[in-house]
Image: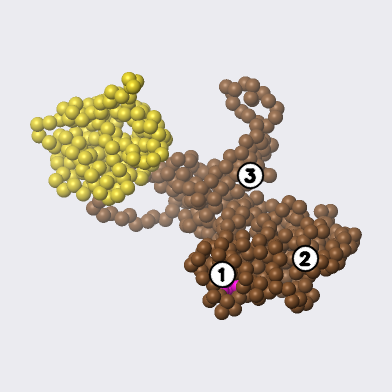
Chain colours: A yellow, B brown
Amino acid sequence: MSLLAPFNKLPTLNTASILLVESEEQFQQSLAVALVEEMTVTVNVRLARSLPLPLENDESRPRIDLVVFIINLTSDLSFRSAKASLKYLDPGYFLGKVCFMATNARHASVHTGLLDAVRQLAVSLHCPLLFAEDQTPEDVKSSARRLLTILKVASGLVPNTSALFLSNLTRCTMPLDIDQPSFD
Amino acid sequence: MGSVLLSSDWLIRPRPERRFVLKFSVASASAKPNKSRSLVDVLGLNLPSGNMDDPAKFLLRRLVRRIPAQMLKATLEKWGRLNAEQRESLNFSQSKWALTQELEALCEESRLTVKHIAELEMIYITENPNQMMWHAFQLLDPEDGALAVELMQFKELFKCHLRELVRNVSVKIKKHTDEAVWIRMSWGEGFSRLSHLNATYVVHYLQTPYVFVSGLSPKNKPLLLQVLTLSTKHERIKDANLSGRKLTAIRDLLLRQYEHVFPTKYPSPLTERNQSVSNLHTEKEQAEASAKRHQMAGQAFGNGVLPALQSAVYKLETKFKDPTNQTMTEQDEPFRCVVKFSSTNLLESLRHCASSGIASTPVAPLLSSIPLKGRNYFVITDKSPSANS
């Protein structure tokens, strides 16, 4: 089992690398195009369906600063695939270098149980959970902007802050109404 | 007689006593003038009766209800039974019910019968074949002249063979623009008159071994199949196990009128990579696997536009196999169940499933045999691992 490790490679100057993991390979493509448009830093985007990543790309792969799991809330398969991929990540990543992105949350056919499961997963791993839409170019652009903010911190490009520090502020917290029954 | 030349077991022979009965029914019908519209037409008599009979009215009413309002005018023009003056007098903006009343009056004025109304129905169905359920049949073992059968000969043979088997039936054969022969048949039940309300439609592309049938009752099925076999000069006909609402999709699938990809063991020729700025920094980690999946999906379903098939049915008659469930596994009876896939474009969805990795690749033979064998009904039994029926 080859673990993806956050610190086994040297960083490149003024460069941030992001790994987008999505089992459906739909949103990641447009998101990647929006991400590399960033001018102030060089953004490398790696796309994958699931982890582990193939060994033969190990040489060419830069140091991954942020791993994003894109979960489509209308598909149970994408959640299970993301969950299965998690165990191929080095524990060091969970100190602020992993984030979940849930899409299609506004879709009518969302199974509410799945939404809770995704939240619980993000809470248990102390990771931020972002909600994004992928239908229009504006949606994609704003999702990319939010990811870039986290990515810049995670890759150490923002002075006076670190991934661990940011994750303490942005990580998903369990809302009170999930586990406790309501009183009325 | 064709049926004597071909003395196969399944042939239905003309029965003289049946003919006699039918003759009798015609004779009895002619005694009642109000029920003999079709007979009057056949004999070319011009009786001074203005009333349309009930079946004609029913058919007209149902037809007007079925045809969408915006298509009604064009369809009536194509029909050509009402003259320009009559057509102009119709007000198409009013409700369908009122329009039907006007149409009925016009038809009575022009002394149109149920046969003419049936023509209108045929025009509408020919233009919009997707309203009905079509079943495909395959003709087998062609005789020497099978490839030389042309329209006139087919028409003659069809009518002649049909007359030998059954009398109480009305047939209308027409050639549509795209080389298809359209046949409309209305069957009579024994002594009763022809039922024009439930007509059978047959579409046959000359010189191809496929026939598409819609609205055929099980009782008339052997008759029609025999007539079709004989008049296309084949020896056998079998169910092609393909049915669907879209006639063009079924036709394209059977006549292989879509883009194919033939399996090769060599990789596809190198395509020039589009190296723009955006994908300089973007790389797919599992690009190889994904390219392979796309290739596999393409091999099974082709790369172009696929016929819009809407469903596929798998009937399983296999033994229940599950090591954890002892009681079910021990039963000798096969575990029967039906699996139905449906979609607006089933083949397209299956291809997407395979190329996006939702379905495993290489594509399971049961799924890939839908385009390969051109069928969408499979019965799976234990004896042979592949699909058969």
Q: CA distance from mark 1 to mark 2?
A: 29 Å
In percent of width and height, residue B104 lies at: 62, 68
Pointer 3: what residue? B378
Pointer 1: what residue? B75
Q: Are marks 3 and 1 in contact (CB under 8 Å)?
A: no
In percent of width and height, residue B215 lies at: 67, 56
Q: Nearer the viewer, mark 1 or mark 2?
A: 2
The residue that appears at 68% across and 59% down in the rendered structure is: B197
Q: Which residues are magenta?
A: B75-79
Q: Nearer the viewer, mark 3 or mark 1?
A: 1
The residue that appears at 28% across and 40% down in the rendered structure is: A132
In percent of width and height, residue B26 lies at: 83, 66
Pointer 2: what residue? B35
Q: Are marks 1 and 2 in contact (CB under 8 Å)?
A: no
Amino acid found under the numbered disc labelled 3: Phe
- B198 drawn magenta: no
